[in-house]
Amino acid sequence: MRRRGVNVFGLAFLDVMFCGFGAVVLLVMLLHGQTLARRHQIQQDLRGAVARLGRTAQAEDETLAALRQSLARATRETEQARARASRLRVRTAQARAMLAAIQHGRQAGAASVASLAEQLRTLERKRLALRAEPRRGAARVAAPRCAPFWVTATAST
């Protein structure tokens, strides 16, 4: 009989190879199932995080809007305060000018009063000098004694 040659790829070898391949496929399917479950859990966690961040962003947007309104109100109040301060500065300058004019008027009035008083004293001295001087050719008639006119004017008021 003739001897047959040795066949390296016999039926038993193919059985072992396909059994190993089946084991690998089974492991891949099991790991893939666990990977899918983990991926699903991660996706749910990420969706929850996105929802939380969305709510946080919405709350921050509301806070930002409130802060912008507050800033606008503060800006308006600042502008109003500046306008009010400007008006008060103008009024203060006007009041100071009026006060200076009044004080100048008082000083001028006091100087005028002093000048008029001096003129009055001068006139009174002249009147007394004229009274004391005898009149020429006429009989001297005694003038009634009365107070100067400025004294009677202030006494009657």
Image (tube, grey):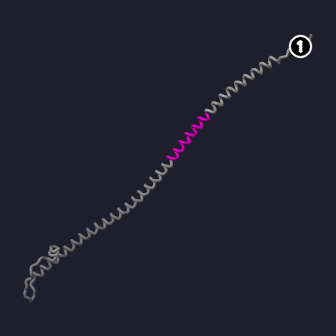
In which image quadrant can residue 136 be found? bottom left
In the rendered structure, the answer to whether residue 41 lies left or right of residue 148 reads right
In the rendered structure, the answer to whether residue 149 lies left or right of residue 29 reads left
In the rendered structure, the answer to whether residue 101 lies left or right of residue 36 reads left
Question: Residue, x 12% and y 81% (percent of image)?
Answer: 130
Q: Does residue 54 appear anywhere in the picture? A: yes
Q: Position of residue 90 (x, y in %)?
A: 38, 62
Q: Between 78 and 146, which is closer to the camera in this rendering?
A: 78
Q: Between 65 and 138, which is closer to the camera in this rendering?
A: 65
**As drawn, which residue projects farthest toward the right?**
1
In the rendered structure, the answer to whether residue 27 lies left or right of residue 63 reads right
Q: Between 57 and 40, which is closer to the camera in this rendering?
A: 40
Q: Does residue 121 appear anywhere in the picture? A: no
User: Where is 48 relative to 115, above or below?
Assistant: above
Q: Position of residue 1 (x, y in %)?
A: 92, 10
Quick check: is 49 in the magenta stretch?
yes
Quick check: is 114 in the magenta stretch?
no
Q: Which residues are magenta?
A: 42-63
Q: Position of residue 142 (x, y in %)?
A: 7, 83
Question: Residue, x 52% and y 44% (percent of image)?
Answer: 60
Which residue is identified by label 1? Answer: 4
- Assign a secondary structure to mark 1: loop
